[in-house]
Amino acid sequence: MAYTHDAPSGKHPVLTNLPPMQVFFAAAQEQLEQEWEHLHALRSCPVFFNITNFHLYNATYGIEQGDRCLHRIAEILQKNFPGKLLTHLGADHFAVLADTADVTDRIEAACHEVQAFIANTNIDLKAGIRYLSQPPADAPLNLAFDNEAALACKSIQKDATRHYAVYTNEMGRLHHLQNYVRENLNNALANRHIKVYYQPIIHALSGKICGFEALARWESPDYGLLSPAVFIPVLEEARLIDKLDRYIVERVAENLHDHIKQKRNILPISVNLSRIDFQLFDPAAFLEDVLHRYQLARHLLCLEVTENALVLRDDAIRQGLRHLQQAGCKVWLDDFGSGYSSLNVLKDYRFHTLKLDMAFLHPFTKESRTIVASIIRMAKELGIHTLAEGVETKEQAEFLRDIGCEKLQGFYYGRPLPGRDCYAYCRERGMEFETMQETLLLSQAGLIDVNQPTPVSIVYDDSVDLQFLQVNQAYLKALQSIGTKTMTDSNRFLQAPDYPMHRKFRRFADQAIKSGRTETMTYVDNGQYMRVNLRTIARVGHHYIHRAELYNVSLDEAVKDKSSHHFDNILRNILLMFEGIWYLDMGRETLEIIEPLTDDRKGRSTNRDITGTFRHFADYYVHPKDRERFLRFTDCRDFHQRAAKSQSATITEPFRLLRSNGNFDWFFITGLALLKSPAKGILFCIARPRITTPEEIQPQLFEMLESCGITSASFAAVQEDVSHALWQAFLKHSHEKII
């Protein structure tokens, strides 16, 4: 018997040899009752078929070709379920009363054949199975097909790995809840059963809270707390999501306004927008109205749009996003990487922030880490900020911070909570709020890419002290090469007023701030030639963010060939300025004579009796009037403490030392405390005053003459040619014979 009925288009009949739905359901009911009567068991089960995304086929090939495709699918089902009751339920849905014994094998065969015929991975045949224990008595049979079996089919609609699913009671419960959501949304909004929960967002560089995400939670008086996974998809499918989203924005704005009136700390809050929102209202105009009514600054509300919402090139979304960006709103791309066209989305739209779901890091493998690091590096190159949500462990948080992810969000920092509970939670755990100044500075700092092989760091500058906010592994390696083990140790040195390089780095940073260009400085630290490049990236008032690079010229093979020979030549010429060089190693308790001052020591030598060596030198080579002062000067027990107070770690004093001609000549001895050396070494450099004319000595002559015993009262007796008289007096006292 052949059946003919109208196609959904109403143009012409397309599916023949299939019974109308009413005939099908009546025949299926009769068959099930007969099976029950004869066997007291059912051999057959309802199966619901759906062709996912069939609208794409119609859009590509046209309605008439779509009808022919449906006809072909009907033939495939008849072939794979021979002799079984089958009908077309309308649109792209079919129903079969199949044998329970081999139903799954026949479904798989039919789905594979349809897939081969359509040849489009986005269009697929799915099935839902409803196993029955007995014929339905309290409800019509069609509910088992187009309700229960259809629910099972719908549950795998977005799962490309499965062709069928079996109906469960949980699916029925969920379906009931979905109906409840559709029917009770307006009442829930009116009675504020839907609450705003907040989850903190942490700035990776500061460790402080820099914002919150607002999330909807439905506290139903009938079912308790409903999961967003239940009501959000239902409201989107029913095109009711705009009511919820506008409600959440209103409540967030209301909350911010109240906090401002109470003079409480406030931070930006992000809210979610659905793709449907752009079709049902103008988000830009709505947001502008909300900001005006609640007297809020524009930066306090950030808008999140999911990547999946942008896969289909919807003109309403494109235009809506353009209006938001033209209005100066910050638009974030949520769930980046979850769709199939992530790179196209970045090419076609402009976003302030990318939100990455940490599903990328499950499992936490080398491959997953490489992917996330590459995404963050790409975002920085595009000038887009990054935020990772779903951070659950310390390991994840540290990894994300190290690769330069700017902001972190997840259960590791706190679950979503109602407003008051969230603020209380943060206070109890000592979680600080960022200031506006910090937010502006760190926003620029976050675009610095530290995830690279070159030694890069991010430096905070308050116009007094410098502080590392982040260093990459290459930069830390350069620091460790000069005895600084961690970033914390380096910050302690930088902020210590007695650190020898403190003033030099301060002047260097000021130079970079003033020039606005990359400045370079070369210096020696713990015996290593170091080169630092510094560029000022951001400024707020008298606070700055710098980008720094640090190279150990002595060790870095990349620059050693070009620079180390040059610096060695410079050092050799500098050494010519000194008559003697001594190195005191406190760790080994040795005094090493690098460059001997006296003729009785030829070449380098090492003395283990430090005190005895200095006493011997004082007795034989230091002027009797200077001996005690010399011994105090070289007393290693407190030299480091005295040198640290000098702010340059150096102390210089003049002494009269015996020369081979029998005269005592004036020399300057400079002691340099190597504060960062593990051995706490001291370097003594001895140099003769380079004086050839009275004019050269005049600024220091008075002080030097006093050290020779000539008091200030003697200066009054000198008339007119003071410089010449003082010079003659100095020469007289500076070449005394041994008594």
Image (cartoon, rainbow, N blue to C red):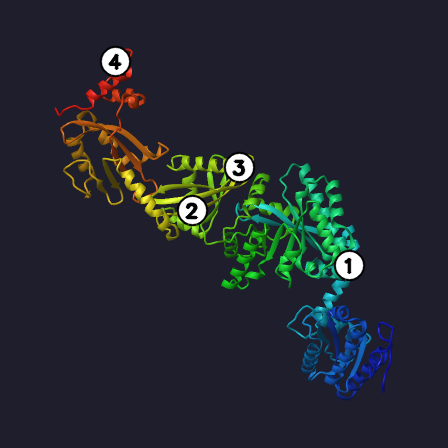
**C-alpha span from label 2 to label 4:** 54 Å
The amino acid type found where label 3 is placed reads His
Is 50 or 685 nearer to us in this picture? 685
Which mark is in front, 1 or 4?
Answer: 4
Mark 2 / mark 4, whichever is N-terminal: 2
Looking at the rendered structure, the secondary structure element under dot 3 is: strand
Mark 1 / mark 4, whichever is N-terminal: 1
The amino acid type found where label 2 is placed reads Leu
Label number found at residue 375: none
**Residue at point 69%, 84% (across, down):** 101
**C-alpha span from label 2 to label 1:** 56 Å
Disc 3 crowd, CA 10 A, few/some/many (<14, 14-19, 20+):
some
Disc 2 crowd, CA 10 A, few/some/many (<14, 14-19, 20+):
many
Confirm whether residue 409 shows in the render: no
The amino acid type found where label 1 is placed reads Arg
For label 1, the residue is 239
